[in-house]
């Protein structure tokens, strides 16, 4: 079975699953009573989901070219938000933006070039603005933050191109997993052991949310016919650690959200933080 055929078959399963979930979710948020505290936010989030889902699925319908476009588009926006959070300058932002465009292109056209040589060039590129600018006070910190940004965003997003159909499955599973984590935390996270927070970085994230995410990601992967221990672990790991990782960055930056333009979420990084970690883990599993 070719990758293109596998992607087509996976899309044939994903479209009704996602469409059904959006339909049920739309009815649910439309009928929420006015006394529900999060009604307005939930409605904004549903509208964002309703716009984002066709864009995500449609990119894979276009094949590797579409996966490249999706990875590059997400990368350019996400690195801009990250550069602001990390307090990086124009030089570092330029390095991150260039990598957000070049790495997915190499993943599409010349994946064999994404090896140790590329890693060495990325390391040098991350340090180059500080080396040439002579920043003796914060140069090492800024270079380290640039390296982290490269790994977290452009390198991880290469998974959208390199993983083929598995990237589609992971993306859909993570989306449902984030909802499952919220539902699990709401239903099971009020008392008992499951109410314990995962980390001080995000006290609202509890073990109950992990249970909800585990159930949702596993069920969706099974519904798509794409379940495997590795993909399930990658999707669940993204749901669990993606938000914590971004919370760590935002807490040091002293902000609540990475942006304010995405209704119901804040910024793009607030929406794809789980996806980034899940793609990175899926690349490890597929290696």
Image (tube, helix red, strand yellow):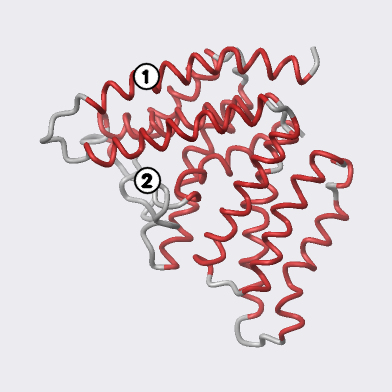
Q: Is residue 144 above or below residue 177?
A: below
- Which residue is drawn at the image coordinates 15% and 35% (left, top)? 36
CA neighbours of label 2 inside 10 A, class few (<14), some (14 to 19), many (20+):
some
Q: Position of residue 124 (x, y in %)?
A: 80, 68
> In 3D space, how far apart are the residues under numbered discs 1 and 2 (Cα atoms)?
19 Å
* Residue at disc 2, secondary structure: loop
* Residue at disc 1, secondary structure: helix
**Left or right of 253 on screen, residue 281:** right
Q: Position of residue 87 (x, y in %)?
A: 53, 72
- Which residue is drawn at the image coordinates 48% and 16% (left, top)? 17
Q: Can you tell which quarter of the image residue 108 is in?
A: top right
The circle on residue 263 is 2
Q: Is residue 229 above or below residue 244?
A: above
- Which residue is drawn at the image coordinates 67% and 47% (left, top)? 72
Q: Nearer the viewer, residue 16 or 191?
A: 16
Location of the C terminus by quadrant is top right
């Amino acid at each position: 079975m070719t990758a293109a055929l596998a992607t087509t078959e996976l899309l044939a399963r994903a479209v009704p699953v996602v469409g059904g979930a959006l339909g049920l979710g739309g009815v649910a948020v439309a009928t929420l009573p006015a006394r529900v505290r999060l009604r307005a936010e939930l409605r904004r989030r549903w509208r964002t989901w309703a716009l984002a889902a066709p864009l995500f699925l449609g990119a894979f319908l276009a094949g590797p070219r579409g996966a490249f476009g999706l990875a590059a588009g997400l990368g350019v926006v996400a690195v801009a938000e990250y550069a602001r959070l990390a307090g990086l300058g124009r030089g570092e932002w330029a390095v991150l933006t260039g990598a957000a465009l070049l790495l997915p292109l190499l993943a599409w056209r010349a994946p064999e070039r994404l090896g140790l040589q590329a890693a060495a060039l990325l390391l040098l590129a991350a340090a180059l603005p500080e080396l040439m600018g002579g920043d003796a006070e914060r140069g090492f910190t800024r270079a380290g933050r640039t390296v982290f940004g490269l790994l977290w965003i452009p390198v991880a997003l290469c998974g959208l191109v390199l993983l083929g159909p598995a990237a589609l499955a992971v993306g859909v599973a993570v989306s449902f997993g984030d909802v499952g984590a919220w539902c699990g935390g709401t239903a099971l996270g009020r008392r008992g052991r499951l109410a314990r927070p995962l980390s001080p970085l995000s006290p609202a994230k509890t073990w109950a949310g992990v249970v909800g995410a585990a159930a949702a990601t596993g069920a969706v992967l099974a519904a798509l016919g794409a379940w495997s221990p590795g993909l399930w672990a990658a999707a669940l790991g993204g749901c669990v650690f993606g938000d914590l990782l971004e919370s760590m960055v935002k807490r040091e930056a002293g902000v609540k959200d990475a942006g304010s333009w995405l209704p119901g979420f804040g910024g793009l990084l607030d929406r794809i933080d789980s996806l980034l970690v899940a793609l990175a883990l899926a690349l490890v599993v597929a290696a």
